[in-house]
Image: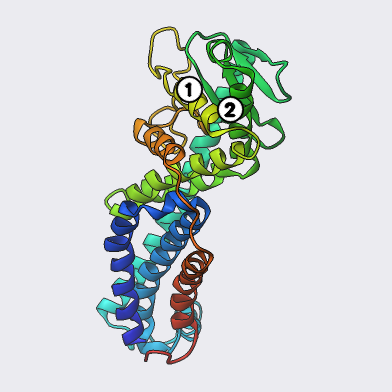
Amino acid sequence: MFWTSWFLAVLAIVLAWPVPILLSRAQWPARSPFTAMVLWQAIALAGGLSMIGAMLAYGLEPVGDNLLAGLRSLAGMVLFNAPTTALGFWHIFALSAAALLTAHLVFTLLLTYYKIQRQRHRHRELLTLLASPSADGPKTMVLNLDSPVAYCLPGGARSVTVLSDGLMAALEPAELRAVLIHENAHLNQRHHLLLWAFAAWRQALPWLPTTRLAQEAVNSLIEMLADDVALKTESKATLIRAIAIVASGSPGSPGTPLALGGPDPADVDSGQPGAVGGSGSARTTASRVSRLLSVQPPLPEPFRAAVLAACLLLLAVPTALLIVPGLLG
């Protein structure tokens, strides 16, 4: 598995640095947010698999010609006191590093989930005190705020969309429908799960360019996906006006008790309430409006198929190299 470890190490470096930088600068994701979202997920999963797989392949190379055989031999050494002389210092170091990195990623994923759930619980308790049910739709709450605010709070059967009095007063009926459809799309498409995964990835590896770029891209792409759902029933002009009005809210202004003008649901360390949607960052808002103003054709079907095929290869190649005996040696 010597060459397998080196190939996976190179693949991990490529997926951690040049690929996410190039993808973050590309213009085509706005033409097909779903395809771009799948590609970011494939890059994240393949990068993590390659990073850990490279260390495992190198560490297990003396005792097996693939991952499964090597793990069986390692289990025999740990559980049944089999001889460990085949493993040198650097092999043991690589195996230890792989185990620590895996544990770190899993722990950070669970810790991020716990933090977000705790924030949402506190947020939901505040809503019971500060908000009242809306007549504009089921599972919709209204905050007594002058600032234009709109976001959704995931929670399974307890999921709610939150609007402010200021927003409802500023919106026309069609614009209000666009906002509600947009926020409900976040809930229906489970965007909070994507945000949780990429937030945990960034928390675990904050020094890796991929994690920051991926989180920023995913935050923007989920807004575009929700916009596309709203456009099925409302016009572009209506949606643009609604986006502009929501974005005019001031997140940290006095009199805004929850600071909800534009919550970043993935930034779990900033004290935000774990909501989804809202006005988002100024950069995200600008990207959304620019996308709606400049009419661009969707990506050609062959291009989308090629990207999805590349996603499958990104996941299949590292897996095959680790499992199939002697594929690269």
Amino acid type of the residue that numbered disc 1 sits on in the rendered structure: Val
| Mark 1 lies on residue | 246
Task: State the image coordinates of residue 259 (x, y, percent, origin top left).
Answer: 44, 18
Task: Using the numbered discs, state the Cα–Cα distance from disc 2 to disc 1 in whole angstroms.
Answer: 9 Å
Q: How are the residues colored?
A: rainbow
* Residue 261 sits in quarter: top left
Residue at 38 percent across and 12 percent down: it is: 253
- For numbered disc 1, what is the local secondary structure? helix
The answer to whether 301 is drawn above or below residue 134 in the figure is below
* Residue 117 sits in quarter: top right
For mark 1, does the 10 Å Cα neighbourhood hold few (<14), some (14 to 19), or many (20 or more) residues? many
Count the labels in the image.
2
Task: State the image coordinates of residue 213 (x, y, percent, origin top left).
Answer: 33, 49
Residue 304 visible, this orientation: yes
Residue at 43 percent across and 31 percent down: it is: 280
The answer to whether 24 is drawn above or below residue 120 in the figure is below
| Mark 2 or mark 1: whose residue is earlier in sequence | 2
Q: In which quarter of the image is the N terminus?
A: bottom left
* Residue 19 sits in quarter: bottom left
Q: Residues at badges 2 and 1 in contact (C-beta under 8 Å)? A: yes
For mark 2, does the 10 Å Cα neighbourhood hold few (<14), some (14 to 19), or many (20 or more) residues? many
The answer to whether 56 is drawn above or below residue 236 in the figure is below
- For numbered disc 2, what is the local secondary structure? helix
Q: Quadrant of the C terminus?
A: bottom left
Horizontally, residue 137 falls left or right of residue 171, namely right
Horizontally, residue 237 falls left or right of residue 294, namely right
Label placed on residue 188? none
Residue at 41 percent across and 62 percent down: it is: 43
Task: State the image coordinates of residue 114 (x, y, percent, origin top left).
Answer: 52, 39
| Mark 2 lies on residue | 179
Horizontally, residue 325 falls left or right of residue 98, namely right
Question: In front here: 31 or 293?
Answer: 293
